[in-house]
Image (cartoon, grey):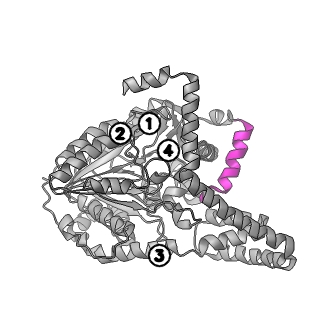
Amino acid sequence: MEKEREKEFLMKPKEKLEQGRQGLLKIIFGRTGIILLLALLQIGILLAFFKLINDYMFAAYWMTVLLGLWMVIVIISRKGNPAFQIAWIVPILIAPVFGVLFYLYFYTQLPSRRLNRRILDEAAGTASLVQQKPEVMEKLKEESPQMAGLASYLCKAGGSAVHENTSAKYFSSGEELLEPLLTELRSAKKFIFIEFFIVSMGFMWESVLEILKAKVKEGVEVRFLYDGMNELTRLPKDYPKELESYGIKCRVFAPVIPALSTIQNNRDHRKIVVIDGRTAMTGGINLADEYINRKERFGYWKDAGIMIHGDAVRSFTLMFLRMWKVAGNSQEPESYKKYIDVPIEHTPAEGDGFVIPYDDNPLDGEQVGELVYMDILYSAQKYVHIMTPYLVLDHEMIVALTYAARRGVDVRIMMPHIPDKKYAFLLARTYYNELLDAGVKIYEFEPGFVHTKAMVSDDEKAVVGSINMDFRSFYLSFECAVLLCRNKEAAAVEADFQKTLQSCITVTQEVYNRQSLLAKIAGKVLRLFAPLM
């Protein structure tokens, strides 16, 4: 690796320029370029149609204006987040023809509805496999009535069960998680299930892949599921065939196709590893070298993950199998029982507390990820400390954060100082003043990029998972997380927050005001359309 870096450093500028040109040509004339070209062609056809109506159909234009006004009334009357309503109303009022037709185009498509129906049917058909134990819920009610209420909601909304007899281990970085992950994979005897949002060629993925190949030869069943966005720039389109040639079963969730469709906006953002039904992992860490800091992109990459052993692993096994079924084209029934009803070799220990793995389907109308965060904020007595890479908030979350701070709770939010997406950073900073005025403390991690998605409160509750504090995670992506209650690892999450805080800049009104006027204006404009981004 060092020799390759030295070779790259010594490369002549002309050679570097030529290499850059080849890379650009590969993108333009490759699969990514073709997909973008076809998508742009569809947009061009739509725009041409809109122009035709405007130029040659005066009556139709005014009918569309009236339709736009009626559509505004319909949007306001519809159940949903007001931020999404405003984001649609503005383009409809500014450009009625374009806005109305674009809205109808996106809200009358069937693929998302069919996907949701498949997910709900699969959940209903397998709900009995991981049922809530009444004695565990009763014990939680005795120890923490408030948390029992949240657990009851999660059970009703998504079939999530609260478990005892489960230990947890928190990892404060990708490099800290890597070796335990590889060790657990090497110990697999029956099956390995892996599901990730990002997979990229490099040291991390190759290290995992070599173990998976070896395990297949030993007779271990290996299934690998990844999001279709990887096919654009990170993995070849025929990569599943390559993995199948090794004996690894592979599926792609929502492959990217050159067609304008709302389903392309619903990505599988989850990170799940399940080994033999006894070990499960999740968090913010993907299978790419920047997540373990072997590749630098935005300074130091601060991330986190969590590993659990015990009864709660069954929930992650079921999460994976459901998504695996939905991502496949086969309608053949499959028995999940043999993967879920496995012997749990775990001895209950002091400090295990309660563990609730849960997932969030963006198509079912339940904002599970956001509501868990809000429940913690509303019930906090002492503090709520948050690490998130993005901060794009709706009105309800702003109220939850500011109200907690105003009633004396120590609310702190840790953000990146070096962002991966400039527009997201500009957008996040538009919330700073409002939060600071209410007493929320904001910090930016100076050495680089915070990708951790974690919340910890009052030394007894913590959430670690894939859920960012933004519209995309709350409303558009498939997500998952682990909720800890009175589990000793909640203290580890808080210790990580305090340690990382030492490398942060404290954001004040003065720091915020140093932004250029152009940056502030850009952020305000972006905020208007934040729900659609």
First in sequence, mark 1 or 4: give its number.
1
The answer to which of 104 and 437 lies nearer the viewer is: 104
Closer-to-camera residue (24/468): 24
- Give the magenta range: 516-531
Q: Amino acid at mark 1?
A: Trp
Nearer to us of marks 2 and 3 is 3
Q: Which mark is residue 114?
A: 3
Percent position (x, y) of residue 391?
A: 55, 48
How far is the residue under mark 1 from the one under mark 3? 37 Å
Q: Is residue 525 magenta?
A: yes
Q: Is residue 114 above or below residue 289?
A: below
Is label 1 or label 4 in front?
A: 1
Disc number for residue 301: 1
The amino acid pointed to by label 4 is Pro
Earlier residue among tags 2 and 1: 2
Q: Amino acid at mark 2?
A: Gly
What's the CA distance linking mark 2 and mark 1? 8 Å
Q: Quadrant of residue 181 in the image?
A: top left
> Which mark's residue is nearer the viewer, 1 or 3?
3
Mark 2 vs 3, N-terminal side? 3
Q: Position of residue 203 (x, y in %)?
A: 34, 37
Q: Is residue 51 left or right of residue 163?
A: right
SS for callout 1: strand
* The one of 341 and 161 positioned closer to us in this rendering: 341
Q: Which residue is mark 2?
A: 174
In the rendered image, the quadrant that contains the N terminus is top left
Could you tell which of marks 4 and 3 lies nearer the N-terminus? 3
Circle 4 sits in a helix, a strand or a loop, which is it?
loop
Which quadrant of the structure image shows residue 336? Answer: bottom left
Q: Residues within 10 Å of mark 1 (few under 14, many from 20)?
A: many
Q: Return the mark for residue 389.
A: 4
